[in-house]
Amino acid sequence: MFEDARRRMVQEQLEARGISDTRVLQAFLAVPRHEFVAKDLQSEAYADHPLPIGGGQTISQPYMAALMVQLLRLHGHERVLEVGTGSGYQLAILSQLALEVYSIDRLPELAEQALRRLEHLGYLNVHVTVGNGSMGWPDYAPYEGMLVAAGAPDIPSPLVRQLADGGRLVIPLGSQQAQTLTLVEKRRDALHQQAITSCVFVPLLGEYGWRAD
């Protein structure tokens, strides 16, 4: 049942909308999305919309997750930083595409659940910590790729410092109500930005994001 739903998701939601990177499509076929949502939501795991995961957070719509990952243009040798571990689903996808993936979440319960889930499913090249995502994770910088799964008012300067020369950062930028998914490329310390599409993500909270009320 879930295998058929996963194939349909890849064909109808990803390929049909222009996701063409073969490695990305294979990763979405391989990772069991239903394992990353609550039991009572598993029947909706492959539907074309976000799902709640607790703590006021969501697991992103499959297409948006695939678009963000495809924009990183990963080849398999990269070290990648993810801001916003959430359920761990996108981290599992990234683990199929990069050498090592480091993920940070501000909510201890989500980070711990995600790490247990990932270990149970056998994803070994992932590392999760709890902290202020807007500060990044400097211990393992520089990163060839960065993916921020929360909306920010501006590009956090710590992430810029931790991004390798030639690296790519995908981040939603805008207000707390609506953002533009933005691709940022770092070339010789200069940043080149490209607006990709409109989106709505939970806010990035922290010193270089939005202030928590």
Image: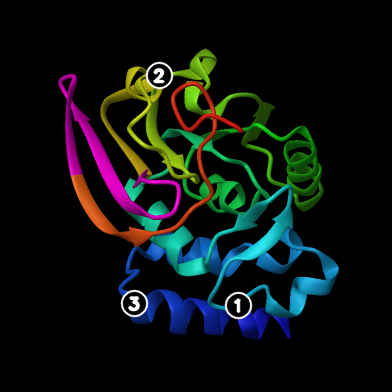
Q: Main secondary structure of the magenta part?
A: strand
User: From the viewer's perspective, is the residue at label 1 or at label 2 nearer?
Assistant: 2
Residue 124, above or below 94: above
Task: Find the distance from the CA under tag 3 to the CA under tag 1.
Answer: 16 Å
Q: Which residues are magenta?
A: 173-193
Residue at the extreme front of the image, as rendered: 213
Considering depth in this image, is 56 or 15 the residue closer to the camera? 56
Q: Secondary structure at mark 1?
A: helix
Residue 126 picture location, percent across and down: 63, 36
Location of residue 108 by image quarter? top right
Residue 147 picture location, percent across and down: 44, 41
Question: Which residue is drawn at the image coordinates 29% and 47% (left, top)?
Answer: 182
Q: Is residue 198 visible?
A: yes
Residue 32 picture location, percent across and down: 68, 65
Location of residue 173 by image quarter? top left
Q: Which residue is mark 1?
A: 6
Quick one: label 3, few (<14), some, or many (20+) residues within 10 Å? Answer: few
Inspect the image, locate mark 3, and give the three-letter code of the amino acid beneath it. Answer: Arg
User: From the viewer's perspective, is the residue at label 3 or at label 1 nearer?
Assistant: 3
Inspect the image, locate mark 2, and give the three-letter code of the amino acid beneath it. Answer: Pro
Q: Which residue is mark 3?
A: 17
Residue at the extreme top of the image, as rendered: 139
**Does the CB distance between marks 3 and 1 fall below 8 Å?**
no
Q: Secondary structure at mark 2?
A: helix
Residue 61, above or below 130: below
User: From the viewer's perspective, is the residue at label 3 or at label 2 nearer?
Assistant: 2
Inspect the image, locate mark 1, and give the three-letter code of the amino acid beneath it. Answer: Arg
Q: Is residue 190 magenta?
A: yes
Q: Secondary structure at mark 3?
A: helix
Task: Find the distance from the CA under tag 3 to the CA under tag 2.
Answer: 33 Å
Considering depth in this image, is 19 or 85 the residue closer to the camera? 85
Q: Which residue is mark 2?
A: 158
